Image (spheres, rainbow, N blue to C red):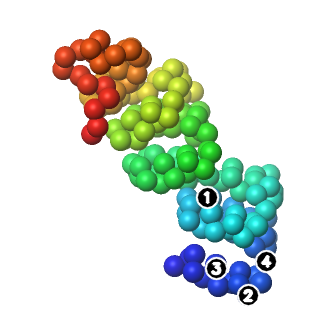
């Protein structure tokens, strides 16, 4: 795969910071594609994390695109992997929707749960002013509605929960 090829090239003294005509380095592209194993490999081999491409972006800035796409597709593993590397839980797409709003729009229950567990802002809205809860209700995603309503109510103990909803159950 890509990792073994990159490791081979680096072992032959390839320039880890070589850039394309647009200024993108291998690290820019690894972040953009959400290839966290490659990101880790490049950083371990001294890839410049502050290299700016012609569009004015550092490599880590490219992660937002991969993160948003992963939320839309419901790729929980990739979402966790990107967030674990310090990318903001409040990352927004071009229309101003946060990851939580995007996950609600796409009906990604597992992603919503993960984002809530990591402290996503449940009051955040898209540029039109609609929240994740509004989208979940509008689209009929009852599991997401339940998760978000539990988060909004923030009960202190499970004994305060309605009998038919366990906010902290898995699945």
Q: Earlier in the sequence, mark 1 or mark 3?
A: 3
Left or right: residue 67 versus residue 59 is left
Q: Which residue lies under the disc numbered 1?
A: 32
Left or right: residue 154 versus residue 54 is left
Mark 2: secondary structure: loop
Residue 95 drawn at (x, y percent): 58, 35
Q: Residue furthest top?
A: 160
Specify the label residue 15 is tagged with: 4
Residue 140 drawn at (x, y percent): 27, 29
Q: Which residue lies under the disc numbered 2?
A: 12
Q: Residue at x 51, y 79 (%)?
A: 1
- Choose mark 3 or mark 4, whichever is in front: 3
- State yes or no: discs 3 and 2 in contact (Cβ < 8 Å): no
- Choose mark 4 or mark 2, whichever is in front: 2
Specify the label residue 7 is tagged with: 3
Q: Quadrant of the C terminus?
A: top left
Examine the rendered structure and indicate whether residue 8 appears above or below residue 89: below
- State yes or no: discs 4 and 2 in contact (Cβ < 8 Å): no
Cα separation, mark 2 vs mark 1, equals: 25 Å
Residue 53 picture quarter: bottom right
């Amino acid at each position: 795969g890509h990792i073994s090829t990159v490791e081979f090239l680096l072992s032959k003294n390839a320039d880890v910071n070589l850039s394309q005509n647009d200024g993108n380095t291998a690290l820019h592209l690894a972040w953009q594609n959400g290839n966290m194993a490659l990101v880790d490999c490049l950083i371990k081999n001294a890839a410049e994390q502050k290299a700016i491409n012609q569009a004015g972006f550092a490599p880590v800035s490219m992660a937002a695109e991969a993160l948003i796409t992963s939320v839309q597709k419901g790729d929980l593993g990739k979402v966790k992997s990107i967030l674990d590397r310090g990318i903001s839980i409040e990352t927004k797409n071009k229309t101003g929707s946060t990851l939580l709003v995007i996950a609600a729009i796409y009906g990604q229950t597992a992603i919503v749960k993960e984002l809530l567990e990591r402290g996503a802002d449940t009051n955040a809205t898209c540029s039109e002013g609609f929240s994740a809860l509004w989208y979940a209700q509008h689209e009929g995603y009852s599991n997401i509605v339940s998760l978000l309503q539990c988060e909004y109510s923030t009960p202190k103990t499970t004994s305060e929960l309605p009998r038919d909803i366990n906010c902290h159950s898995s699945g």
